[in-house]
Amino acid sequence: MAKLVVTGMSGSGREDYISSAVEIMRSRDLEVVEFDVGSLMFETAENLGVEIPEGKILNLATSTLNYLRTTVFEKILRESSRHHNVIVNTHACFRWRKHLLQAFDFYYLNLLSPDLYVNVVDSILKVKARLDSSPQWGGRLSLKDMLVWRDEETLITKSIADFQGKPFYLIPARQPPETLYMMVRDYSRPKAYLSYPMTHLKGEEADEFQVRLNEFVSRLRSRGLIIFDPSEVEDSDILDAAELGGEIVVDGKSIKVDLKEVESVKEDIYDQIVSRDYQLIDQSDFVIIYYYVPVMSPGVLSEMTYAFSSAKDVYVVFRGPESPFFKYYSTRIFDDEDELFRYLEEHDILDVRDDL
């Protein structure tokens, strides 16, 4: 039995992610109800005879928005008590007309008392593609605005969770929706951050490594381990897209990427990549380093150091150059995947079954 509050900025892919997860839950006979706060606010307004033109709800007076939100949360509180598993789908904030709007009410969140908070994020290129094609958001936000809003949504959600003493998880929209299913079923199950070299491999070597990595991740997940993979929200793709110039197709939609605009926020993107990866480490029980390349990766070494210094166990599958620093920040080094799996099995970290 679990109650989750799931947030995410507009364009984050939150809606689709929750829908996919709920479908999986119900297909596996897990009873769950989703309350979409935004949809319920429109429904409530319609029932009250309040006409809201498309894309104009955030232009309503603050008192009207608060009244609609209060009415919705009263409904959620009444109905959620009749269900074992509840997902509240909402924003934490809105970046509207160059300022921040609150999208929650502490009073009702305290009454709801969720078991955990989740914030869904996606790469800024995909966020831009979705927002630019939206009637409500198209042309309203610069790339800088989008980056700031995404960061604000994460920070506010985490702050609420910290204030209530509840767990917080950042989940990439490309993460398998089974992750949310497993958190509803048992959010205490083991979680691991996966670290590996991402920028030093080229050509055929990169392709071979990616195939092996994908098989490794799939194998871990099939045994019930929640894996947080940093590549599932990759922001560097917008830097590559900008260098190509002009337009790029994202999820079947053609969008324009301006090189100067991307250059102006490059440092923001780099800083957010590091901050996000560290958050993924913070929310994990341990870290797995997957290292089968002949060169050292600064990113991997930084993540090892951060995890080790945060009292996390760091397990390494390693065939790389010898380094005393690499050994120092490792809890244990394994020669191959099978040796790691045997260790995780012996310590009851992996499910006995090969399915969920």
Image (spheres, rainbow, N blue to C red):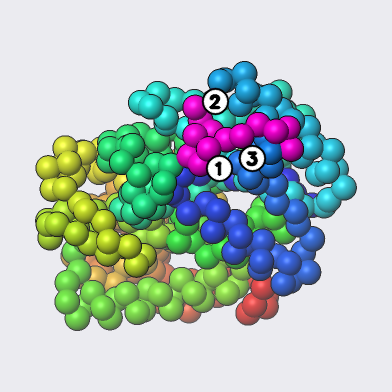
> Residue 60 — which label?
2
Label located before the other in sequence (3 or 2): 3
Q: Is residue 343 visible?
A: no
Dot 2, crowdedness within 10 Å: few (<14), some or many (≥20)?
Answer: few
Q: Mark 1 = which residue?
A: 7
Provide the major secondary structure of the magenta segment.
Answer: loop
Q: Mark 3 = which residue?
A: 42
Towards the viewer: 235 or 296: 235
Numbered range of the magenta stretch: 47-60
Which residue is located at x 41 percent, y 46 percent? 135
Q: Position of residue 128 (x, y in %)?
A: 33, 49
Towards the viewer: 144 or 209: 144
Q: From the viewer's perspective, is residue 161 above or below residue 327?
A: above
- The kind of residue tagged 3 is Phe
- The kind of residue tagged 1 is Thr
Is residue 250 a member of the stretch shown in magenta? Answer: no
